Image (cartoon, rainbow, N blue to C red):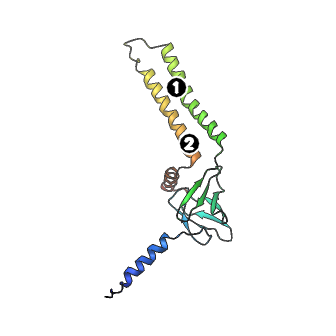
Amino acid sequence: MMSSPEPAASRHAKSQAEAASEKRQLCLQDSYICPVCRHGQIAELTLMDAFACNFCRHIFTANLTTQSIQVVDSSQPMAWRWNGWRWQSVYQQDRNLTLVLGVVGVVLLVLPSGLIWLSAHTFPPLPGSKGAWFPAVWLGCTFFAHLLIVSWLAVEYYQLPLYVTAKIRLRQLLGRS
């Protein structure tokens, strides 16, 4: 007994699914999702061996032999390797710099808050006075303000995709390119 042939639409859908599952080599003529913002597409810059994102506007140099790209317009040495389907981060972080940033972050959190706590406990307000609540509120505001600053420095240093996308969207809302 012979089965009936597959419909043309079914064969076309299968061939597209097989093509999507195949490994793609990194080449300058294709476009890929941006590894920094994960929103835009990176494509070849005309007459150059480089890519540029149409959303976050980062420029990447391509090394086709190692199937990797590196950001050239940032102070951070960020690089990614293409595995055929998606980008994988190449950890090129300087461990000494990361340690220094961690220590500076902890100092920025602990030192100002610690000084305010120490002064509030050394010279406490009179019990039952109107301003007895002020040292606790001042300590909380100082801690959260410094936590916000340290968090901003961390996401700026590591260039988290959600942060980069939000920063670009805000810039577009404000009318700046």
| Residue with the most extreme front position | 1
Front residue (pair 115, 42): 42
Tag 1 residue = 113
Lower sequence index among marks 1 and 2: 1
**Quarter in which the C terminus is drawn:** bottom right
Identity of the residue drawn at 67% across and 65% down:
65
Front residue (pair 90, 39): 90
Front residue (pair 139, 11): 11
Q: Is residue 58 left or right of residue 169?
A: right
Identity of the residue drawn at 57% across and 46% down:
156
Q: Estimate the x, y position of residue 81 in percent, counting from the top left.
A: 60, 59
Q: Is residue 126 above or below residue 97?
A: above
Q: Is residue 57 left or right of residue 138?
A: right
Q: Estimate the x, y position of residue 44 in percent, counting from the top left.
A: 62, 68
Q: Quadrant of residue 96?
A: top right
How many residues crowd mark 1 within 10 Å: few (<14), some (14–19), many (20+)? some
Q: Estimate the x, y position of residue 133 in percent, counting from the top left.
A: 40, 20
Per the rendering, the mark at residue 154 is: 2
Q: Is residue 100 above or below residue 59?
A: above
Dot 2 falls on a residue whose secondary structure is helix
Q: Are marks 1 and 2 in contact (CB under 8 Å)?
A: no
Q: Is residue 131 left or right of residue 41?
A: left
Mark 1–mark 2 Cα distance, whole angstroms, equals 19 Å
What residue type is disc 2 on?
Answer: Ala
**Quarter in which the N terminus is drawn:** bottom left
